[in-house]
Amino acid sequence: MPYTGEHAARIVDPAEFAKFRRQNNKFGRGVHAIFGIRAGGGSEVQAVRFDSTLFTVDEAKKWLKDHDYKPILFEPAIAGKEQAGEEEMGDKEELTKRTLAAEFIAAPEKMQETSDGGLLVRDVKLLAPGTWTDSMQKTPCRYTEKRLAEFATNWTDPSMWSRHPGGMPRDITEKVGEIRGPRYNGGAVQADIFYHGKTTRSKDTIAMVKAGLANYVSVEMRTHDTWIPEDKLFEADQIVFDGVATVNKGACTVCTIRSAEAAEIEGKHIDAPITPDQAATPPEVIQVIQKAQSMDETEKKELDARFKVLEEGISKQVKTLEDKIASKDKELEQTKAELEKLKNTPMPKTSAGQEKEMELPTRTVIVDRRAGTVSGAD
């Protein structure tokens, strides 16, 4: 099946794999890899996708030939989303998994306790327009108002979990609630969150939400991303929401249960939104910058003091090394001067201006034939 904005080269039949993982720009800008993962373990490149804004069909085929890939099927990109067909959204090898956290501040007027021990939190903003770096892919991706409004109700699972799956499957007791009535409203994907209070984990989460200790939810989703060359970042043009987890830090800074203004004042975010200019920066550098930007004045002063001590220590080490280098340079200059002096020193002279030849020591040898002895003296 052809894809929007991407030439697709199928290397191995997808039926041979249990699941798939996509890695954007794996083989260079605009060349994405789809890895097939077998049920018994092991993985290999199942397909290669080419950004059609960066590669023509002929260029994509040449790349495959140059890199010794022999596709069993090659499909050129199609231009418009309307031509893609409904099944594209369900193609599990197509979408990139992302987890994106948002802060919600549980205002009392937004919370309603139920008679059976549950807690309903209304109008929680799950994802707002902007460029956010998610915790799974660790790459910035832009989410537009148009796409969020289009896919706000596209949920495969409304479950609220106590954590993301990570490397270990979740058990049923980690399902602490569900989201209700997802919609696009107030400039964000919103939903009401219901914590059922039927398990210890759910009861603990309710207590933490009410105490203001649990302020973040993280949507689990799969996206189809398109590379935007002029902005140097990816943009999600299709979104499938797979669930939500309660977590301890956020990325979508304007997503709060109150308002965007409240988030700007009260939120401290490690994964803050980034500008297009920052999109080409390595993710680990972006995270350091964002963490520094999220610090309060006390934290900044402590960090500045630590940097000052570190800077002073480095300066002392540099000064010691410079002194040693200067000393060695001085010794080298002295040695050069002595060599030059020896070079320019004339040999001893004799009369008539001739250089005196080296004289060998003389030796007298006495042979006594009768005694049969030989003796000598210098």
Image (cartoon, rainbow, N blue to C red):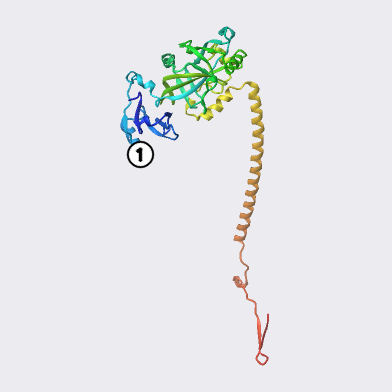
Q: Position of residue 101 (x, y in %)?
A: 52, 20
As drawn, is 1 to the left or to the right of 29?
Answer: left
Residue 153 location, x and y as percent? 43, 14
Q: Is residue 268 left or right of residue 279?
A: right
Name the residue: 65% across, 31% down. Answer: 308
Residue occupied by mark 1: 68
Q: Position of residue 309 (x, y in %)?
A: 67, 32
In front of the other: 138 or 176: 176
Task: Name the residue type under label 1.
Answer: Asp
Q: SS of the residue at dot 1?
A: loop
Quadrant where the image shows the C terminus = bottom right
Using the image as rendered, state which of residue 339 and residue 84 is in the foreground. 84
**Measuring 64% from the left and 27% from the top, which residue is drawn there?**
303
> In the rendered image of this protein, does residue 318 appear above or below residue 9?
below
Q: Nearer the viewer, residue 340 or 37?
A: 37
Identify which residue is drawn at 64% across, 49% down: 328
Judge whether 224 appears above or below 312 on screen. Answer: above
What percent of the width, then of the height, locates residue 266? 59, 15
Decide if residue 158 is on the left or right side of residue 308. left
| Quadrant position of residue 312 | top right
Pick the quarter of the image with the N terminus.
Answer: top left
Where residue 256 sits, quadrant-wise, is: top right
Against 22, residue 120 (above or below) is above
Q: Nearer the viewer, residue 178 or 297?
A: 178
